Amino acid sequence: MTKAFPLQWPKGRSKTKNRSDSRFQVKPTKAFDEMMTELDRFGAANVVVSSNIPLRRDGTPYRDGLTELLENPGVAVYFTKKKRQICLPCDAYRRPWENCRAIGKAVEAFRAIERHGADQILDQAFEGFTALPAPDQVSDPNRTAWWVVLGVKAGATKEQINDAYKSAARKAGGATLKLNRAKEQGLAAASGP
């Protein structure tokens, strides 16, 4: 299960040894917000931003944590696109907001590739970004039924599914890919309000 906090760096991806300061000219909160906007415009679903920044009750990172000099300031963004699980990790910079900015700019570039009609190049590129399991992720997260993950009955209503999702996300310390997937599957299968 990929968690938002603490950082879940994908297995097999090396970490940067000598980090530097970026030359980005943007406020840290704007870097995070623009990264999320770019992911939304890109059509990323089930987004989990994993970092070592503590989370607020709503599952988003504390904004002052974006500027801290952390021992491990990396950010790994997990999401799905075209039914493919993708992870974009970055730890090239010394502060989390700088790594968020780098990821946001990369997603902006991916969107440009799509706009110019070179989707097949993007699909080939994403073969290399296919999400590897986070260190604490089970071997096959698709084996558990959505209602088991959320702790509801198979015939739960949309309201029950949303309530169970929020409760499970709080317990897990934030949204996870497994929880997001279970909610999405449950809402698709649900009847009623």
Image: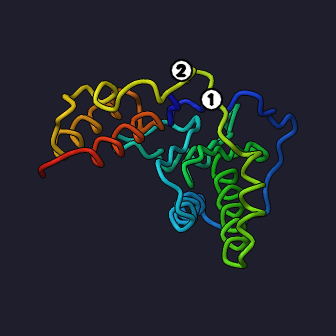
Amino acid at dot 1 = Pro
Quarter residue 122 falls in: bottom right
The residue where tag 2 is placed is: 138
> Number of labelled discs?
2
Quarter residue 160 falls in: top left
Tags 1 and 2 in contact by the CB under 8 Å rule? Answer: yes
On the rendered structure, is 177 left or right of 11?
Answer: left
> Where does residue 155 sit, x and y in percent of width and height?
17, 35
Instruction: Give the number of the disc on residue 55.
Output: none
Outermost residue on the right side: it is 18
Amino acid at dot 2 = Val
The residue where tag 1 is placed is: 133
> Where does residue 167 sit, x and y in percent of width and height?
26, 33
The residue that appears at 22% across and 31% down in the rendered structure is: 154
Q: Answer above or below: position of 122 versus 11.
A: below
Determine crowd level at label 1: few under 14, some 14-19, many 20+ residues with C-alpha closer than 10 A: many
Determine the CA span between mark 1 and mark 2: 8 Å
The residue that appears at 73% across and 71% down in the rendered structure is: 113
